[in-house]
Image (cartoon, coloured by chain):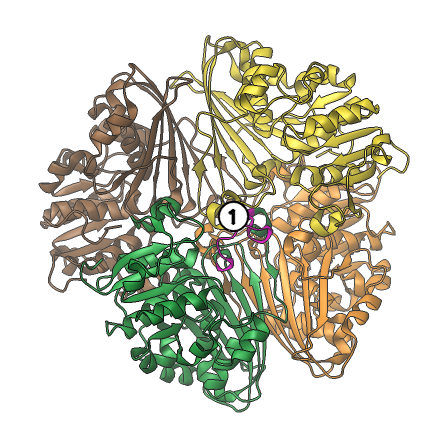
Chain colours: A green, B yellow, C orange, D brown
Amino acid sequence: MADDGPAVLVAGASGYAGALAARLVDRHPGLRLAAVTSRSDAGRRLDDLYPHHRVALALEELDLDGPHGAVDAAIVAYPHAASAPVVAALRGRGAKVVDLSADFRLRDVATYEAWYAPHPEPELVARAVYGLPELYRDDLRHADLVAGPGCYPTATILALAPLAPYLEDVVVDAKSGVSGAGRAATDKTHFVTVDENVTPYGVGRHRHMPEIDQELAAQGARDVTVTFTPHLLPLDQGELVSCYATLREDVDVERLFAERYAGEPFVELAGRPPGVRDVRETNLCRIHAVRDERTGKAFVFAAIDNLWKGTSSQAIQSLNLMLGLDEAAGIAP
Amino acid sequence: MADDGPAVLVAGASGYAGALAARLVDRHPGLRLAAVTSRSDAGRRLDDLYPHHRVALALEELDLDGPHGAVDAAIVAYPHAASAPVVAALRGRGAKVVDLSADFRLRDVATYEAWYAPHPEPELVARAVYGLPELYRDDLRHADLVAGPGCYPTATILALAPLAPYLEDVVVDAKSGVSGAGRAATDKTHFVTVDENVTPYGVGRHRHMPEIDQELAAQGARDVTVTFTPHLLPLDQGELVSCYATLREDVDVERLFAERYAGEPFVELAGRPPGVRDVRETNLCRIHAVRDERTGKAFVFAAIDNLWKGTSSQAIQSLNLMLGLDEAAGIAP
Amino acid sequence: MADDGPAVLVAGASGYAGALAARLVDRHPGLRLAAVTSRSDAGRRLDDLYPHHRVALALEELDLDGPHGAVDAAIVAYPHAASAPVVAALRGRGAKVVDLSADFRLRDVATYEAWYAPHPEPELVARAVYGLPELYRDDLRHADLVAGPGCYPTATILALAPLAPYLEDVVVDAKSGVSGAGRAATDKTHFVTVDENVTPYGVGRHRHMPEIDQELAAQGARDVTVTFTPHLLPLDQGELVSCYATLREDVDVERLFAERYAGEPFVELAGRPPGVRDVRETNLCRIHAVRDERTGKAFVFAAIDNLWKGTSSQAIQSLNLMLGLDEAAGIAP
Amino acid sequence: MADDGPAVLVAGASGYAGALAARLVDRHPGLRLAAVTSRSDAGRRLDDLYPHHRVALALEELDLDGPHGAVDAAIVAYPHAASAPVVAALRGRGAKVVDLSADFRLRDVATYEAWYAPHPEPELVARAVYGLPELYRDDLRHADLVAGPGCYPTATILALAPLAPYLEDVVVDAKSGVSGAGRAATDKTHFVTVDENVTPYGVGRHRHMPEIDQELAAQGARDVTVTFTPHLLPLDQGELVSCYATLREDVDVERLFAERYAGEPFVELAGRPPGVRDVRETNLCRIHAVRDERTGKAFVFAAIDNLWKGTSSQAIQSLNLMLGLDEAAGIAP
């Protein structure tokens, strides 16, 4: 932890994403962790709640009129709709913000409201940059407000961006570990429910679909049919998207990926299908893309750690860009 | 399922133990599943809640003045203190009852109240037989009220009963799968908490200790120091107790076990240490007992399925004895 | 176990599939387990190798000129190419045979040889019935030689058969537990490789593809492009196929499934996506099929236990039909 | 990785311990990874074998007469008896060596030979320092040859050292993840064997016992009976030892630990029992020690990552001391 770098607040640090963000800030060579806050666990020490993160701070109630309003930057890990007002207040006090909720991911407010809830801060939406540095690096260098992508969209968009102009129809079968479902203890996250099991969920109606559509369109996709179905797996951290794409023309798939991701510090092209262990606790997205001779389709498999590249370390990657630091500071593999 | 056997109610069938008991009754060749009840999930079908049990009945509100009071027998799977009044009401209407809670396990009401809560039906305690057929088979044949043992006591007592008169000091290091913690979704049962982990809990103060002490004394133990420490493991069903016993005299450990458990249908003596997979979804307790030459101690390892022999199939074993059926009916390995 | 039913040999009983087949025969009310054989583990007791199956027999060297040639029926669990000669020898001695290898699954010998090896008994291929009772029940009643389907084809074909005539393009993303990879200890089946991981394998070239193509064609599929990609999951038994199908016309998906599988004892249509736990250690295939309004595609999810319905209990289902027994004998849920 | 620090060879880098050691050297700010060698996998790239370690070097055949003999230091990860000759050769060429095998752990050669094999280099034994920095920090600063402790002894000795002079009888129930069994693919490490299971092994005869005895004696233990039984758990990395100690006198357990480990950078005293997740992928040993009022015993629970503090990161800790670097360089939590 730097003693004199920009002061960073992590709001909502008692959940998985916020707690990891706090750890990454805490160990970052160029940032200073100013405070961690929580609505549900204020008063508890973060290293009591998450010993393995070893962040020796107590969780506080958020106090934007006090010291929390004076930070240089903030990562906000609140649920959707609850996040936007906090983000707005932080922005109003001059802090640069990376928001981990869905509140600023969709450029079209009506689409947001159709999938989520009435938007509490619709006028702020246009100010946000989508926090996928591989697509928006230059914009992020000048951003004050960044919408951290969903974990599924992160892997899916990185898996499909090089093919976007050629996509006609794509089936995305996604598989995620349980940490993606968050810290809430429910029937769905109970060990006995998940162990020795695999289950599709959100069939035909997962909230990450409009986000994927939006970004593929921004990459040049036209009239593409995207089928997206997530599955819950018996593991903690890790996400794999298996993409099966019908293309409009006969492109050189491997070359498109090699060219697109040349020099990218956090995209790793692999000669064989990745496993999620290959990227566990890293900011990397590991991709294997091939053209299948038998069917003519492109097969793309992309693996990330849903809490790292899918959420919290990617937030640090964006924050590094926003603050003019080395993009890989604190999150190098 | 028998169409004309004794009618059995399972009260509290939405939890893991009750649901399994319902399944075992439902498939039992000599019993009829009359009804399943639940306080929290009344109205839901049991095969919606637990598809793998395939019990095609809806959960009902308990109505002892209606049909639920007219059953021949009942298995009650309520939390401690909540169970005793229901048991008393069922007994008052003539039903034979196996209670899966702690309410009737401890013969001394004061001990119960020191570890649990004020006892709602103290006068019934003396009527209960401890439902460990390997120790109380004859009593169970004449019992109207049976206290189903705890899962840890089941394995521990079976592991130590043959040695009881010789025990001086015994360390029991117990390991259990998560189903033993029940269906309640909490931080403790969240997949992410348990996965890739092992943690001791209830150190020095687990409620199963007085039950173990009581039954070892009944088997002839005198002034024995029992150390009991459970650990939570990343698996669903299965329990292993590793017992390290200092003995008062130099006995032939293997022979004591062979003699004690000869002919027992549900105790399996093994020539090597058991794994919990060896007994998964069975009513068996698999035991490996040896005298360690180096230390002079007896080492006993006993494996059960905590939901089966540790709870629900053992309840069927007792119920079979109470109703004059074949002890192994419906639960043969 | 019946004392006087047909005598059944299980050849190759030291692997997962053969050992489970032996257990199912051993507990079957109408069959007698005559012997279990193994090339690698002859002399060991099966209940030493697999305590949880509790088959109290020693594994023998196969001796077809001795007692093993005199059985009424046999289940052969040998690797492909090694199986066919044993099957031929058993058939030559009059035994009815269910073969679990790939040797008799493909009707076209040239296709077999392109994917596997030179066929040791090509003239027998035309005699074999494909052992999927939901498709070939009547043929199985008169069969002497049955080719047990692969586990992936079992789930995939049951998931797609009702839609076969309407299929234009289908992506099958399959997920399997590790038992599907067999008992061989390799880097791929090492706990540390699989745990906390998920990996695609056999991309574009899995041997189960021609089997799926063959059976979908037999169900009326024409010029359908099938994409099939399996993934290895960190669980033991269980297989889920997620099918995303583009259809040639606007059919009523749910009705097609309801009509096709009405009365099927081992197909379960579910109102929500199945998990593999729902069918663990059963002969059931649980299917959820819907038409997705957004994309127009049919989504079909089918779960089986790869060792049970995917292999060994399905072999019993076929054997029951071949021997004129109740189809569900010994494998009822 | 430092470009100009001491050059370090990792011999035997294709196993779990060697590969992790290579990664830790590779990322170390003060060391330079000179080469990685392997007998079984020479020619393969280490980042092909272990993508998640991201060591971009090819494995070489060991060539001590070539460049491998010219390194400043080496970590040797060979099996016992195979290691000592390589260590001797490296020492003969002037390299400082940390050996991860058992070859130099036991000061008494006869004891080594009773538990392992004839010792190939008995005269070197007296030169070795036992690589547990918390016990031998000063000796390690001057050591040329270090014997890396076993993973179980690391946790057990740290758990018991403060109590050593008072120990009368201690039961150590140890639990380890599968990575402790190494990379060899066997029945024992097959996913299907381990998953949903827990099994004791090496009962009464585990090779780590004499090592524990030796070091407890060095800490002042006299005539103590140590019972040590390991168990295999369904997880990858992590080890917990649960120690139940009868003491000779009534000491203040918590104070003994607080005093002994004050200022230790890699021992963490916890107010509640540790889980192995708390220390995953760290060089920390997390300990909870209490006196149990009911039995008078001391209960000590110690958690480590068996591959890190139990093996490879502890080797770096020793190497840092041997080379005059900061003890925590490259392995800070």
Q: Name the foreground residue: A298 vs C146.
A: A298
Q: Say if D143 sits above or below A208 in the image.
A: above
Q: Residue placed at 27% from the left, 24% from the top?
A: D163
Residue at the front extreme?
A65
Is D66 placed left or right of D48 in the picture?
left
Is D322 placed left or right of A317 in the picture?
left
Q: Name the foreground residue: B260 vs C233.
A: C233
Asked whether the viewer can see residue C93, the reply is no
Q: Say if D320 sits above or below C57 in the image.
A: below
Q: Residue placed at 41% from the left, 16% from the top?
A: B296
Instruction: Give residue B128's quadrant in the image.
Output: top right
Q: Quadrant of the C terminus of chain A?
A: bottom left
Instruction: Give residue D6's quadrant in the image.
Output: bottom left
Residue at the bottom extreme?
A249
- Number of marks in picture: 1
Crowd around label 1: few <14 · some 14–19 · many ≥20 (10 Å): many
Q: Position of residue B39 (x, y in %)?
A: 71, 41
- State yes or no: residue A186 in magenta: yes
Q: Residue placed at 34% from the left, 81% from the top?
A: A139
| Residue behind mark 1 | B190
Q: Name the foreground residue: C200 vs D204.
A: C200
Q: Position of residue A164 (x, y in %)?
A: 48, 85
- State yes or no: residue B21 in magenta: no
For the residue marked with disc 1, what is the amino acid?
His
Q: Residue placed at 39% from the left, 43% from the top?
A: D276
Q: Which residues are magenta?
A: A180-191
